[in-house]
Image (cartoon, helix red, strand yellow):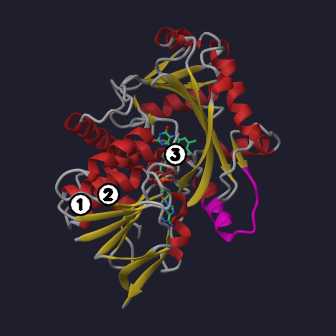
Amino acid sequence: MDITIVGGGIIGLTSAWYLRADGHQVTLVDACDRVGQGASHANGGQLSYRYVAPLAEPGVLAKIPGWMLRSDAPIRFKPAFDSRQWSWIGQFLRACNGRDQAASIASLLPLSLYSRRLMDDLRKTTGFDFAWRRNGKLVLHRNPASFAAARRLLASSPGADGEQFALDVRACLDVEPALERMAPHLAGGIHTPSEEVGDCLALCQALEQGLRRGPGAVTFRMAERVERIELASGRYHALQTDHGRIRGDACVIANGADATSLLHSVGVRVPIYPVKGYSISAPLVAHREAPEISITDFQRKVVYARIGDHLRVAGMADIVGHDRSIQRARIDTLKRETAACFGMAADLAQAREWSGLRPATPTGMPIIGASKRTGIWLNLGHGALGFTLAAGSARVLADRVGGRTAAIPDAPFSPSS
Ligand SMILES: Cc1cc2nc3c(=O)[nH]c(=O)nc-3n(C[C@H](O)[C@H](O)[C@H](O)COP(=O)(O)OP(=O)(O)OC[C@H]3O[C@@H](n4cnc5c(N)ncnc54)[C@H](O)[C@@H]3O)c2cc1C
């Protein structure tokens, strides 16, 4: 088939990878002049295969009143006259319960572990260099009650035995000596030695280079914005862009946080809303003070990872619409947290600052498969886990396009479910 992919982030590029491998003729179109300029640009870099709990968790509801009063709260909300925002928030709040959280984790875990396998193959067969390391991850809890809840979740997590461990503060320090400053404030942590880290942008660029080469090379149409999807007799016909028209047999919508409005015009509704986050990437200066392991500060919702010779610090979940501007106060909070936790490990004055929009669904479940319009396929809504879930999601999509059964249970990701 002749397939056009809208979106050159990690989801569009991995989709192109597996669709081409299946023998399709692929065109990829992106509004930016280079790949990986959206949420995939400077995310937390965590390949968090074992830790897939969605943002909607039972503890969130109790914390909201406190967060509303604090300017440095990890989650912020700016009300807008936008029914999509209110509808998303309503669905998100309803999903903040133990049953829905467990259901999301049960569906996401097979997808993430499948992604790990595929990413392993991809790395080994291509030799792509994207600062990948299997450095392990520690999710740290400052609050004894939240540590106890994390231990309970771990105990009920399928297959966690032997791959994830609950550690007291002493054991956390043994695993990561750079936690010395944080230790007095900690209750404990969940250690997953098998977790990985990498540079998502570097992987996007490597995928692009690979896709441009060889038989069946993918056509890239960069700096071209898709404005409309055209239907004929109710099924996919073409994409109307600001440069013309792209015809083909089918399209894959993988344009992240911008998908909702593009799809709305053809009557396809997806519960995706942007959840804005920030990152800083600061050159490492005192290597011994910087963590080797990826760290998640659970209460503050901040992640720390070494990516090459930089410390990447990412966090915040701001529900403020499509505003991509960098708010000084949010960056200052990340810098303050970094200095408090890791002292002078990185040169914060030289940090590159970034914000991005996570394409989030209320439950944290991505949407993968055929839309109700024949020929319009979706690979969307990966929220805070797009880098982690990209390979598996793209393979599932390609299998569905090819009429094959996916290697994992994929019904929970169906657009119609
Ligand atoms: C602060 C932060 C930290 C994160 N940390 C992690 C992490 O540690 N691990 C992890 O797994 N995930 C993480 N994520 C999530 C991850 O980055 C996203 O889920 C992922 O990048 C989404 O990829 P995407 O390809 O769907 O979207 P994007 O990367 O946003 O790509 C969408 C592309 O579509 C293009 N586009 C949009 N509209 C149009 C149009 N009309 N026409 C043409 N092109 C269009 C855009 O230009 C863009 O290139 C984080 C996200 C943020 C914001």
* Residue 251 pos. (x, y %): 35, 70
Sequence-first tag of 1 and 3 = 3
- Identify residue type, mark 1: Asp
| Residue that carries the numbered disc 2 in the rendered image | 410
Within-10-Å neighbours for mark 1: few <14, some 14–19, many 20+: some
| Residue that carries the numbered disc 3 in the rendered image | 384
Q: Which residues are magenta?
A: 77-91
Q: CA distance from mark 3 to mark 2?
A: 19 Å
Q: CA distance from mark 1 to mark 2?
A: 10 Å
Which residue is pictured at 51% across the width and 65% down the height? 259
As rendered, which of 93 and 284 lies closer to the eye? 284
| Residue that carries the numbered disc 1 in the rendered image | 399
- Identify residue type, mark 2: Asp
Instruction: Classify 22 as above or below 333.
Output: below
* Residue 11 pos. (x, y %): 40, 53
Q: Is mark 3 within 8 Å of ligand 1?
A: yes
